[in-house]
Amino acid sequence: MTTPFIVTAFCFGVFVSGIFVLLMHRLAVPLGLLDSPCERKSHNGQIPLVGGVAVFIASAFMFLFFQDSSLKRDLFLVASAIIVFIGVLDDKYDLTVRSRLIGQSLVALILIVGLEKHFFTLGDLFSLGSDIELHNTGIVFTVLAVLAVINAFNMIDGIDGLLGFVSSIFYTFLGIQAFLNGNDYVFMGCLILVSCLIPFLLANLGFKPIGNKKIFMGDAGSMFMGLTVVWLSVESSQSGQVIVRPVTLLFFAALPIIDMLAIIVRRIRKGKSPFVADRDHIHHIFMRGGLTPRQTLLVLVSLSIISALCGFILEFFHFPDLIVLIVFVCLCAGYSFMVLHSWRFCRWLRRNFNNKK
């Protein structure tokens, strides 16, 4: 894969996605896909919930033109279209938790059964000299992984830009791994997704040239991002050409995964359902501590990059799986410490930020 081809694909992806972002913005009102302020949402006015649809359509267009025709590509696009459709229904009609989980599980099974591919092994996590094989439980594990990651990415979608940046960080670092290992399929998939997210981020954050076309990702977008993250993880860690170990992938998507686990534990300890939405996510905590949404975004994106870079280094130097797992557990502990001391952390950030201003 030549450099001109890579540059052309990237630029074309940005261009195509920009067109669909503008088009879907105009169609949001006729389609009734608008997000209104409520107790959990403090934005001004009704915002189109079409970012995820625009990113998916642009990505599908790019996959059709820049990926070789194959059952793997076509089945992935079919599954993605179904998950986006479920997300659109959820954005418009607010589906029940059971309906969403059933739909997401069926989509996961379409890919697993259709391509006979899922998580077969978790690697040598405990340095016993052999990988942890999942055998018949691999299908169940993969379905649960899809459900977990989709909902983790949905939970992190609470401030402008966060879901788009967190997804882009995952695709970027996995794409680098794929490029270094010569896996063109995974590399091109990551390149396409990053390029198609750029116009959405410009619109979502209000940057030119489409800054006056503000849109949200919506459940359609978080479901699409979650599905692609898991499926690219399977492709890169379970295929014949393993380009990254499963435990390393945790670092590439650390923020949404750790935040989801922490919020579920907190809700259960409070006697609440894990599926009931609230304002106790890490971005909410930082903003209650006095940070602006943009400052919170900067902090969390920086932490995501640091986590992904840490995983990349551990993978590059072939640290044992057990060491990689221990480092990830330390990240979880550090996250918990930061949340427990969020007020002190926010005061420190405000003090330093204001001094620099």
Image: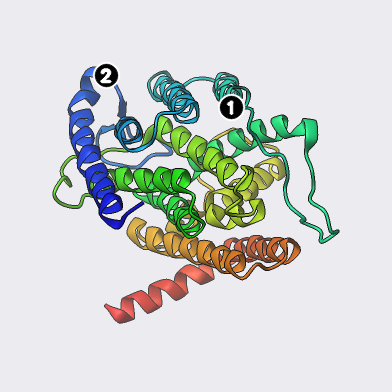
Residue 320, given in percent of the width and then of the height, sits at 72, 65
Residue 20, given in percent of the width and then of the height, sits at 22, 33
CA–CA distance in space, label 1 to label 2: 34 Å
Q: Closest to the observer: 68 or 274?
A: 68
Residue 254, given in percent of the width and then of the height, sits at 56, 55
**Disc 2 element:** helix
The picture quadrant where one finds residue 321 is bottom right
Task: Residue at 77%, 55% (x, y): give it.
Answer: 124
- Observer-side mark, 1 or 2, equals 1
Mark 2: which amino acid? Leu
Instruction: Mark yes or no: residue 184 visible.
Output: yes
Residue pointed to by mark 1: 115
| Left or right: residue 146 compared with residue 298 | right
The picture quadrant where one finds residue 47 is top left
**Disc 1 element:** helix
Residue pointed to by mark 2: 31
Residue at the far front: name it: 2
